[in-house]
């Protein structure tokens, strides 16, 4: 038998549902969709993924297709938007397969809140890495993919925040705690990345 527990933590605050353990395990509690408190007057984030797949000291980067709306002709990590119904890891794995034809065990390196200048909406960027990819490498409509030596990245036309993010990922190992960062545009419209350590 399941019971529902209702706790009011603070007067005039939303009610919280909390699972209490019992002799048979955790009691199932419910939280209706309406209790998620979704409102459009709060700052919101659009979730995106960014993947730096590694092979030795090389990374798989994508050179944006000439007709691409954003970052045409520039190198970037693999990635894209999350779709409804996905968790963020599944979204990253799907983007990797769609853009490269490869599969890999990915791990979360960090998150970046991107302030693109909109007062209501920003980007929530989830940065992943992985290695030991399998599959057949293939291009996509997004652009051509190629393995680039880490030392050579500085000589390429790249998306503006790639050097900062790739440098951070390059010095990480699986199991390291994920970083937290924010990026924003300064008065001269230069993109700045700040890490929260």
Image (cartoon, rainbow, N blue to C red):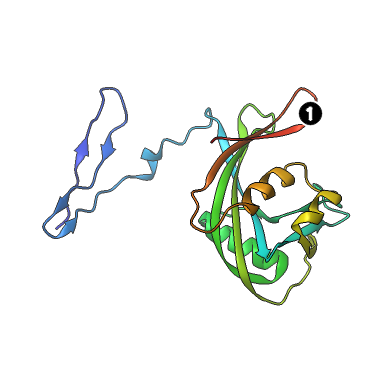
Give the position of the N terminus as an image quadrant: bottom left
Name the quadrant containing residue 181.
top right
In the image, 63 versus 176, the foreground residue is 176
Name the quadrant containing residue 180.
top right
| Residue bearing mark 1 | 189
Q: What residue is drawn where x is 65% and y is 53%?
A: 170
Residue 132: x %, y % from top left: 61, 71
Q: Residue lying at the far left in this picture: please name it.
A: 23
Q: Secondary structure at mark 1?
A: loop
Q: What residue is drawn where x is 62% and y is 34%?
A: 121
Judge left or right: residue 167 versus residue 22.
right
Q: In the figure, 89 relative to 32: above or below?
A: below
Q: What residue is drawn where x is 70% and y is 43%?
A: 164
Structural crowding at the residue carrying mark 1, measured as other residues with C-alpha within 10 Å and reported as few (<14), some (14–19) or many (≥20): few
Judge left or right: residue 29 versus residue 90.
left
Q: In the figure, 93 relative to 2: above or below?
A: below
Name the quadrant containing residue 117.
top right
In the image, 25 versus 156, the foreground residue is 156
Residue 28: x %, y % from top left: 23, 53
How many badges with numbers are in the image?
Answer: 1
Residue 49 visible within the image: no
Residue 123 visible within the image: yes
Residue 109: x %, y % from top left: 56, 51
Residue 82: x %, y % from top left: 59, 53
């Amino acid at each position: 038998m399941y019971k529902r527990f209702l706790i009011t933590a603070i007067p005039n605050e939303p009610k919280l549902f909390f699972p209490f353990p019992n002799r048979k395990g955790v009691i199932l509690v419910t939280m209706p969709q309406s209790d998620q408190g979704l409102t459009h007057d709060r700052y919101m984030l659009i979730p995106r993924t960014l993947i730096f797949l590694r092979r030795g000291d090389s990374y798989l980067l994508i050179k944006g297709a000439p007709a691409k709306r954003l970052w045409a002709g520039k190198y970037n990590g693999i990635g894209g938007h999350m779709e409804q119904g996905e968790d963020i890891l599944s979204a990253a794995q799907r983007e990797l397969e769609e853009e490269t034809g490869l599969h890999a065990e990915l791990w979360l390196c960090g998150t970046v809140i991107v302030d693109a200048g909109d007062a209501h909406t920003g980007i929530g960027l989830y940065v992943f890495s992985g290695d030991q990819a399998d599959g057949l490498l293939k291009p996509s409509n997004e652009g051509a993919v190629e393995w680039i030596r880490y030392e050579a990245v500085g000589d390429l036309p790249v998306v503006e925040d790639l050097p900062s993010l790739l440098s951070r990922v390059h010095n990480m190992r699986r199991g390291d705690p994920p970083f937290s960062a924010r990026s924003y545009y300064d008065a001269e419209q230069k993109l700045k990345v700040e890490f929260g350590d």
